Amino acid sequence: MSSLPKSPALRALYWRSEILRVMYWLRGEGLGDLVDVGMVCNYLEVGPRECAAQLEGLVGDGHVVRDGSWYALSARGLAEGEAELATVFADLARPTSGECSDECWCQISADEHEACNGRGSGPGTQPGAVL
């Protein structure tokens, strides 16, 4: 877990994002509106103590509500969990270098292709290509 933030404030932001995303996903998949620490740990690389502490932090800031050993997203947590999950999928949907969609300007312009990919190869850059 060396990639985790070292400072407590950034670590809390990191885990808030991860936990809300997992809880929102579980809810959306019909796997449960209520989760316990063990269930969250199954989907994240986090120990039970850290997970419980982060869930309690989410209770404290109003993202999650607790009933005994069960946790659920509050309205605020539901909205933020949805946004967190949407952000992940938006990032996955973005084309990476050389994987632009058919609608990208780089498909018809050598200059745009170079800007998209940082190199001068691709559509319109072959010798004799006419744009």
Image (tube, rainbow, N blue to C red):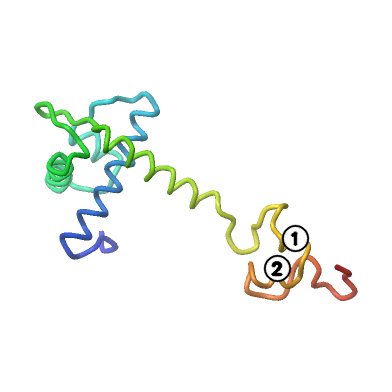
> Are circles 1 and 2 on residues that touch, CB within 8 Å?
yes
In the rendered structure, which disc, 1 or 2, sits on the residue that comes first in sequence? 1
Measured as percent of width and height from the top left, residue 101 is found at: 67, 53
Report the Cα–Cα distance between label 1 and label 2. Answer: 7 Å
Residue 22: image quadrant is: top left
Q: Is residue 39 above or below residue 107?
A: above
**Residue on which disc 1 sits:** 107
Residue 68: image quadrant is: top left
Measured as percent of width and height from the top left, residue 97 is found at: 60, 64
Which one is nearer the viewer's eye here, 48 or 5?
A: 5
Q: Is residue 67 above or below residue 61?
A: above
Residue at (58% x, 60% y) in the render: 96
Q: Residues within 10 Å of mark 1 (few under 14, many from 20)?
A: some
Q: Amino acid at mark 1?
A: Gln
Measured as percent of width and height from the top left, residue 6 is found at: 20, 65
What element does badge 2 sit on?
A: helix
* Residue 113 marker: 2
Residue at (22% x, 48% y) in the render: 46
Q: Is residue 73 left or right of residue 105?
A: left
Q: Amino acid at mark 2?
A: His
Quadrant location of the N terminus in the rendered image: bottom left
Residue at (71% x, 75% y) in the render: 120
Residue at (32% x, 42% y) in the render: 80
